[in-house]
Amino acid sequence: MNNSAALSGDDFKQRSRDQWSANPCGAIAADGFEPGSREYFDAIENYRYEVYAPWMKRVIGFDGFRGKDLLEIGCGTGTDLLQFARAGARVTGLDLTPRSVEIAARRFEVHGLEGKFGIGDAENLAFPDASFDAVYSFGVLHHTPETGRAVSEIHRVLRPGGQALVMLYHRQSLHYWGGLVLKHGVLRGELLRYNLREIMSRHVEYGAVETLPLVKAYTWAEARRMFHEFASCEISVNQLTRSELRPFGRLLPERLFQWLAEGFGWNLVIRAAKSSR
């Protein structure tokens, strides 16, 4: 059994470094292209916004931060950060994994855009108070041991009236209960050997090597409580693919499919504003 209860926070952070060093975010979509080439980055981008999550550009609103100082925590290969920069934001990309920082910086070089990049820990941001107008983190903070501390750090580095935009995995989703609990936990008997967090580590962030990074999921209410320091907090739900609903996914009317995605999708999208005082 993978005894994750015995691991320290530093152990989990090292697992995250190992995971995304071996499996850069989105790179599986660019197999066959030279890493670091324009074609490599374009393949990752096209898959993200056209195949995997076509709702993202509409919901995130990358073009709403023109002229703002924006920090991304967990920039990965720089796909989302590039969209903010293209739309006129002054961007800083931070990641725990040195390889991700190198790839993201290369991506900006290829596209001829400016950005600042650094290696850093979400739980201990190396920036003064009130450094940014916006902080963005998509699919990252549920991998760090002290997610609540990371949210407090986001609040600290935001300027008055600044905005946080964060995605966390959704525990009340079809993917959690159908794909992880039922399929892997019950039908494949993994609950006899692992707890649910270990099952998520084995099946959510998988890749060429079995690094078993920390993976957590949250309810809507838990997410709202974590953002209690903020003056306002709005939460929406999305992320579902028709292949996850096999064998009936292709047959569902689009309206019903979107209803399921926006009620029981795998992503909680949290938009919170710091007080302007």
Image (cartoon, rainbow, N blue to C red):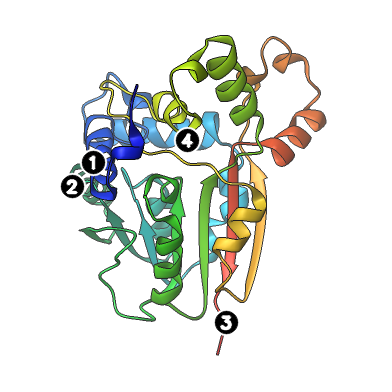
Q: Amino acid at mark 4?
A: Arg
Bin the neighbour count of mark 1 within 10 Å (Cα to Cα): few under 14, some 14-19, many 20 and up. many
Real-space Cα distance between discs 1 and 2?
8 Å
| Residue linked to disc 1 | 17
User: Which of marks 2 and 1 precedes in the sequence?
Assistant: 1
| Residue linked to disc 4 | 48
Bin the neighbour count of mark 3 within 10 Å (Cα to Cα): few under 14, some 14-19, many 20 and up. some
Real-space Cα distance between discs 1 and 4?
22 Å
Bin the neighbour count of mark 4 within 10 Å (Cα to Cα): few under 14, some 14-19, many 20 and up. some
Mark 1 in CB contact with mark 2 (< 8 angstroms): yes
Q: Residue 98, which numbered label?
A: 2
* Residue drawn at x 24%, y 43% as measured from the top left: 11
User: Which of marks 3 and 2 precedes in the sequence?
Assistant: 2
Q: Residue 275, which numbered label?
A: 3
* Residue drawn at x 66%, y 13% as measured from the top left: 246
| 48 over 188 or under it: above or below | below
Quadrant where the N terminus sits is top left
Q: Amino acid at mark 3?
A: Ser
Mark 1 in CB contact with mark 4 (< 8 angstroms): no
User: Which of marks 4 and 3 precedes in the sequence?
Assistant: 4
Q: Secondary structure at mark 2?
A: helix
Real-space Cα distance between discs 3 and 4?
33 Å
Q: Secondary structure at mark 3?
A: loop
59 or 162: nearer the viewer: 162
Q: Is residue 87 visible?
A: no
Q: Nearer the viewer, mark 3 or mark 4?
A: 3
User: Is 252 situated left or right of 58 in this image?
Assistant: right
Q: Secondary structure at mark 4?
A: helix
Q: Nearer the viewer, mark 1 or mark 4?
A: 1
